[in-house]
Image (spheres, rainbow, N blue to C red):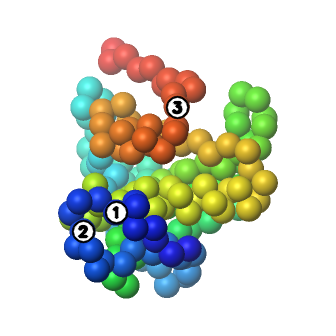
């Protein structure tokens, strides 16, 4: 799962090594920590929520992921953890019931964003899904998270459905 040079953004020096590996139990604390440091990026501005509520929801998400078949991928930049991706490999599409991989959560260290880490994680997850014979990879992204949306669109992801909300 070694990194590809073409995925590196302009912010990394030419001799920087990016790689992705399968997560181990020793990565659990890192995943929990980075998730907490980045989860507020998933909160839409028109639906503000207290951080403590968002953390409870994140903890519930982790519990749901742990209760089913999933893969944890860890990105490393020169041997230091740079991000993670959690994907479910036995969650069928809720409308068609067709098999798919589903990216439940992905986070990149804020200081390493827009440098190819997210693209590398996505590529590794897609490879793992293909190895399992999954024909699709799906995910949800907050509409306002323009950087994440641009990454996904660049990687070939298209909008299939929209969650629409209204403040009452």
Q: CA distance from mark 3 to mark 2?
A: 28 Å
Spot occupied by residue 135 in the image (x, y as percentages of width and height) = 73, 45
Q: Residue shown at 66%/50% (left/top)?
A: 101
Q: Looking at the figure, which quarter contains the N terminus? A: bottom right
Residue tagged 2? 12
Q: Residue shown at 27%/74% (left/top)?
A: 14
Secondary structure, mark 1, is loop
**Would residue 137 appear left or right of 15 to someone viewing this image?**
right
Q: Nearer the viewer, residue 163 or 80?
A: 80
Q: Nearer the viewer, residue 81 or 40?
A: 81
Residue tagged 3? 158
Classify residue 124 by image quadrant: bottom right
Q: Nearer the viewer, residue 34 or 14?
A: 14
Q: Are marks 3 and 2 in contact (CB under 8 Å)?
A: no
**Would residue 79 appear left or right of 70 to someone viewing this image?**
left
Residue 110 visible in rendering: no
Q: Earlier in the sequence, mark 3 or mark 2?
A: 2
Classify residue 112 by image quadrant: bottom left
Secondary structure, mark 2, is loop
- Badge 2 crowding class, 10 Å Cα cut-off, few under 14, some 14 to 19, many 20 or more, is some
Secondary structure, mark 3, is loop
In the displayed structure, 154 sits above or below 131; it is above
In the displayed structure, 139 sits above or below 96; it is below
In the displayed structure, 42 sits above or below 107; it is above
Classify residue 16 by image quadrant: bottom left
Residue tagged 1? 8
User: Which one is closest to the eye, mark 3 or mark 2?
Assistant: 2
Q: Are marks 2 and 1 in contact (CB under 8 Å)?
A: yes
């Amino acid at each position: 799962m070694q990194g590809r040079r073409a995925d590196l953004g302009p912010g990394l020096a030419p001799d920087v090594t990016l790689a992705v590996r399968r997560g181990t139990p020793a990565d659990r604390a890192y995943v929990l920590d980075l998730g907490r440091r980045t989860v507020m990026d998933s909160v839409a501005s028109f639906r503000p929520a207290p951080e403590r509520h968002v953390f409870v929801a994140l903890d519930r998400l982790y519990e749901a992921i742990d209760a089913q078949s999933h893969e944890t991928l860890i990105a490393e930049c020169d041997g230091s953890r740079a991000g993670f991706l959690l994907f479910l490999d036995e969650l069928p599409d809720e409308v068609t019931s067709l098999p798919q991989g589903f990216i439940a959560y992905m986070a990149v260290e804020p200081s390493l964003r827009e440098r190819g880490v997210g693209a590398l994680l996505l590529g590794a997850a897609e490879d793992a899904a293909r190895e399992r014979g999954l024909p699709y990879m799906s995910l949800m992204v907050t509409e306002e998270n323009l950087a994440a949306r641009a990454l996904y669109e660049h990687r070939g992801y298209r909008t299939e459905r929209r969650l629409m909300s209204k403040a009452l």
